[in-house]
Image (cartoon, rainbow, N blue to C red):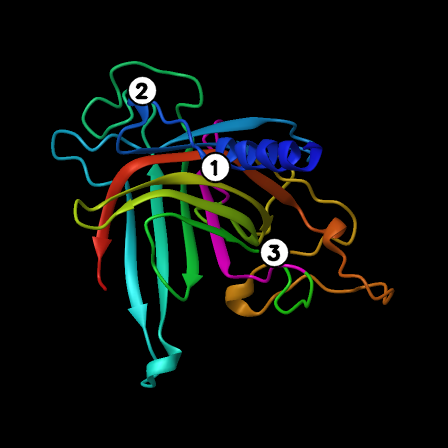
């Protein structure tokens, strides 16, 4: 009896955790918190993708693509989510200058790419900064975040600040290919790739800082030779509480 009751409670717990609560105000939008802590800046920045109204460009969408090397058993798919947050006041390109709001000068964007063997209506995809580990998830997700301009108007000489990461979780709660929409949640840890002064928002420059940019094969190293990768020498941020609801799907499958 106790065993059956425990099993029943576990099932209820799993189903309750799998449900994602979406709000009407999130329709066709992506929101997130960019947590700069535990760096010395100790701040969180809001991310709300710009509204697609009145001729404004689509600032949040997902692309589905299929790839193959020519053999039937080596086909895979990519799910790529892109979102821009360039305008704050009304969060669209037409009414952005009606009044000034908090973090008015912040301009940033986010790109999430997941690599999967199959596409389904509901999916949970987890990665890590391990490329090949027998016991832990490997990097089947890549995330890219660029802070193009901070709240003080700094743009790092036009370079902005780029961050990359594989340690991420993507939960697709709804994928309706027929109607071209997708909803879900996302969280990730990213590491800084761009050199910048500590005065720039979110930047921490500890001694022996190790930048991370996998696009040029610049990875975090084991500098002290103790057998453990020195992630503590990297400058990281967290993308938290990311929710996207019924954003447009570009289906290239």
Are dots 1 and 3 in contact, CB under 8 Å? no
Foreground label between 2 and 3 = 3
- Whether the magenta-drawn stretch holds residue 142 is answered as yes
For marks 1 and 2, give the CA distance. 34 Å
Q: Looking at the image, which is closer to me, 144 or 134?
A: 134
Query: Residue 83's image quarter?
Result: top left
Residue 89: assigned label: 2
- List x then y, in percent, for residue 149: 44, 37
What element does badge 2 sit on? loop
Label 1 crowd (10 A; few <14 / some 14-19 / many >=20): few
Task: Residue 161: tell me if it is visible.
Answer: no
Name which of mark 2 and mark 3 comes first in the sequence. Answer: 2
Instruction: Give the SS element for disc 1.
Output: helix
Of the pair 160 and 220, the residue shown nearer to us: 220
The total of numbered circles placed on residues is 3
Q: Is residue 56 toward the left or the right of residue 191 in the image?
A: left
Q: Nearer the viewer, mark 1 or mark 2?
A: 1
Magenta range: 136-156
Residue drawn where x is 33% and y is 77% of the image: 68
Upstream in sequence: badge 1 or badge 2: 1
Q: Quadrant of the C terminus?
A: bottom left
Residue tagged 1? 18
Badge number at residue 128: 3
Image marks 2 and 3: residues in contact by CB distance under 8 Å: no
- Of residue 59 and residue 176, the one placed in the foreground of this image is 176
Please tell me how crowded label 3 is: few (under 14), some (14-19), or many (20+) other residues with Cα within 10 Å.
many
The image shows residue 165, relative to residue 53, as above or below, that is: below
Q: Position of residue 13 (x, y in %)?
A: 56, 32
Q: CA distance from mark 2 to mark 3?
A: 36 Å
Residue at the (38%, 81%) spot, across then down: 73
- Alpha carbons under labels 1 and 3: distance apart: 21 Å
């Amino acid at each position: 009896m106790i065993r059956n009751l425990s099993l029943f409670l576990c099932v209820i717990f799993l189903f309750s955790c799998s449900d994602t609560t979406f709000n009407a105000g999130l329709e066709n939008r992506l929101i997130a918190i960019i947590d700069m802590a535990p760096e010395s800046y100790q701040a969180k920045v809001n991310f709300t993708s710009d509204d697609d109204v009145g001729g404004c460009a689509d600032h949040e969408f997902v692309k589905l693509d299929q790839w193959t090397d020519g053999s039937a058993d080596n086909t895979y798919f990519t799910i790529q989510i892109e979102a821009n947050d360039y305008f704050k006041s009304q969060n669209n390109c037409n009414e952005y200058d009606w009044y000034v709001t908090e973090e008015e000068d912040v301009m940033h964007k986010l790109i999430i790419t997941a690599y999967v063997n199959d596409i389904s209506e509901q999916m949970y995809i987890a990665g890590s900064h391990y490329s090949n580990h027998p016991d832990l998830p490997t990097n089947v997700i890549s995330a890219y975040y660029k802070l193009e301009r901070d709240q003080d108007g700094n743009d790092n000489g036009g370079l902005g600040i780029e961050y990359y990461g594989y340690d991420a979780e993507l939960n697709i709660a709804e994928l309706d290919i027929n109607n071209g929409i997708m909803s879900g949640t996302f969280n990730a840890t990213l590491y800084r790739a761009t050199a910048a002064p500590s005065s720039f928002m979110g930047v921490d420059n500890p001694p022996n800082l190790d930048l991370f940019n996998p696009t040029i094969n610049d990875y975090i190293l084991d500098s002290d030779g103790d057998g453990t990768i020195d992630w503590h020498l990297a400058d990281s941020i967290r993308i938290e509480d990311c929710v996207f609801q019924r954003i447009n799907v570009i289906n290239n499958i």
